[in-house]
Amino acid sequence: MRRFVIDTDTASDDAVALVMALKAPDVEVDAITVVAGNVPLERCVQAALYTVELCGKTTPVYVGLDKPMIQPLITAEAVHGNDGLGDIGLDLTGRTPANGRAVDVLVETICSSPGEVTLVTLGPLTNVGAALLREPALAKAVRHCYVMGGTGHLPGNVTPTAEFNIYVDPEAARIVFESGMPLTMIGWDASMAFAFINPKVEAEIRAINTPLANFVCDIQRHLSEFMVRLSGKAGFDLPDPLAMAVALDPGIAETEDYYVEVITGEGPARGQTVLDVWRRHGRQPNASVVRNIDPKDFQSMLKDAVR
Ligand code: RIB
Ligand code: CA
């Protein structure tokens, strides 16, 4: 069994990624750590707890940090709904997270089993950045870190240059990318290119007609409406599930190793992930960046998870 820890700002795409990991037969999810992002922290916690229960699991969910390191929290209710799961009327109240702080759990779980635990990050990197500040050895102890974040090729989805997870907390993201941890970056450009679910594919998923198959589609309602407004395209993209698919089966992705710089400070490039494609800086690569995935491979992993 492979051991995963998942850090998430649980909303409509994160929840699908959680389902994929929780239902994977060869993966043990040791812990889910929650960070503020798509919606305020408590709603992310409740959405994560709901998803774990729906999967019939008892995986512990830990409360993390409720705001970024420097700037005020930016949320995305316009994209995911106020409750994060599409505002479709789910009962997302009253569930209880595990005792313990997410940052402590990240450090203790990973550092107590060097080389064994894979970390998948689906939200802003506030918890992981804080964990690295607390214990820099985490970078060497983690087996591999798969980051949904950034955009190898512009545009961003929050500003013309920045993707949401990085833009919410660029300072934390810079700590993670500069930490030396083995890291694979699955950017929003990859999500739009390889994980866009059009109405035909959505119908194929719904035809599976299990509670999970309907859940993973139903909670995308708000995202679908946002996507039409943003791009005019019918359907929705699934960035976090694509990152989870790469973590579950790295062989589905073609990657290139680049030095990736996270831009902090003020200005129009804040939160941009700049890929040094031609190695102009002469710096050692710090990330394997996903460049190509067959959408059919992703779609079949997603369908298998909800059967
Ligand atoms: O930009 C997409 C990312 O931001 C996804 O992880 C989504 O859930 C939001 O966190
Ligand atoms: Ca997310």
Image (cartoon, rainbow, N blue to C red):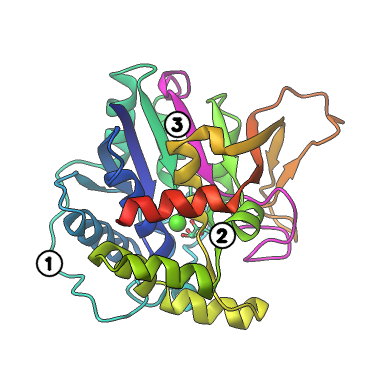
Q: Circle 3 sits in a helix, a strand or a loop, which is it?
A: helix
Q: Position of residue 130 (x, y in %)?
A: 42, 38
Magenta stretch, residue numbers: 136-164
Above-or-below relation of 228 to 245: below
Mark 2 residue type: Phe
Q: Circle 1 sits in a helix, a strand or a loop, which is it?
A: loop
| Residue at 68 percent of width and 61 percent of height | 156
Residue ID for mark 2? 164
N-term-proximal mark, 3 vs 1: 1
Q: Main secondary structure of the magenta part?
A: loop
Q: Residues within 10 Å of mark 3 (few under 14, many from 20)?
A: some
| Residues under numbered marks 2 and 1 in contact, where contact means CB atoms less than 8 Å apart | no
Mark 3 residue type: Leu
| Residue at 63 percent of width and 77 percent of height | 233
Q: Residues within 10 Å of mark 2 (few under 14, many from 20)?
A: many
Look at discs 3 and 1 and give the one toward the viewer: 1
Q: Position of residue 23 (x, y in %)?
A: 27, 46
Above-or-below relation of 74 to 67: below
Residue ID for mark 3? 133
Q: Closer to the camera, 240 or 10? A: 240
N-term-proximal mark, 2 vs 3: 3
Mark 1 residue type: Gly
In the image, is 250 to the left or to the right of 30? Answer: right
In the image, is 99 to the left or to the right of 195? Answer: left
Q: Quadrant of residue 281?
A: top right
Q: Which mark is residue 94?
A: 1
Q: Position of residue 207 (x, y in %)?
A: 36, 70
